[in-house]
Amino acid sequence: MDELYKKTYGYLLSCGFSPVHKGFKLIIDAVNLLAEGRCKLTMTDVYKKLAQKHSISPHSVQKNIKNAIDFASLNCDIDFFASEFGLLSRGGGLSCGAFLCYVTDRIQYG
């Protein structure tokens, strides 16, 4: 297991994410892709690459990631989640792309 995987896994757990959700693994894989090709990939590219890897549609990739984000935002310390991701209400307004870019930056640069 590489260092980026471990850091992302631990960070997601600390934010209230559950590894039983399909989106949990997809988030880790997306962070890995974004970290490798930061300026070269769009979210569409990321979703397509993950869809191929996991034999699902790009829409399913995005939906599973969104479900994982929503679950974490509803089942964690809302003050922590709001301060970490800038949310004012549970389940509100955090796009998958913004979340993935934030997590990638957070893991890479602290």
Image (tube, rainbow, N blue to C red):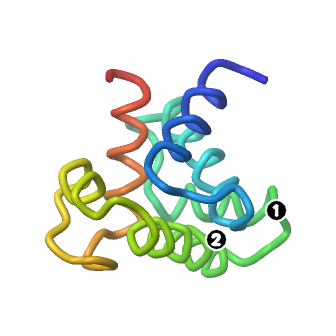
Q: Image quarter for residue 67?
A: bottom right
The residue carrying mark 1 is 54
In the image, taking residue 17 as reference, residue 75 lies left or right, namely: left
Residue 27 rendering spot, x and y as whole percentages: 58, 53
25 and 40: which is toward the camera = 25
Residue 66 rendering spot, x and y as whole percentages: 49, 73
In the depicted structure, whether residue 32 falls above or below residue 27: above
Specify the amino acid type for callout 1. His
Residue 68 rendering spot, x and y as whole percentages: 55, 68
Q: Is mark 2 on a helix, strand or loop?
A: helix
The residue carrying mark 2 is 61
Specify the amino acid type for callout 2. Val
Q: Quote the CA–CA distance across marks 1 and 2.
A: 9 Å
84 and 3: which is toward the camera = 84
Q: Tags 1 and 2 in contact by the CB under 8 Å rule?
A: yes
At x 72%, y 67%, the residue is 22
- Quarter holding the N terminus is top right
Neighbor class of circle 1 (other Cα within 10 Å; few <14, some 14-19, many 20+) is few
In the depicted structure, whether residue 54 falls above or below residue 10: below
At x 82%, y 62%, the residue is 54
- Mark 1 or mark 2: which comes first in sequence? 1
Residue occupying the far front of the picture: 77
At x 33%, y 79%, the residue is 91
In the depicted structure, whether residue 5 falls above or below residue 40: above
At x 54%, y 57%, the residue is 17
Q: Is mark 1 on a helix, strand or loop?
A: helix
Q: Image quarter for residue 20?
A: bottom right
Residue 58 rendering spot, x and y as whole percentages: 64, 74
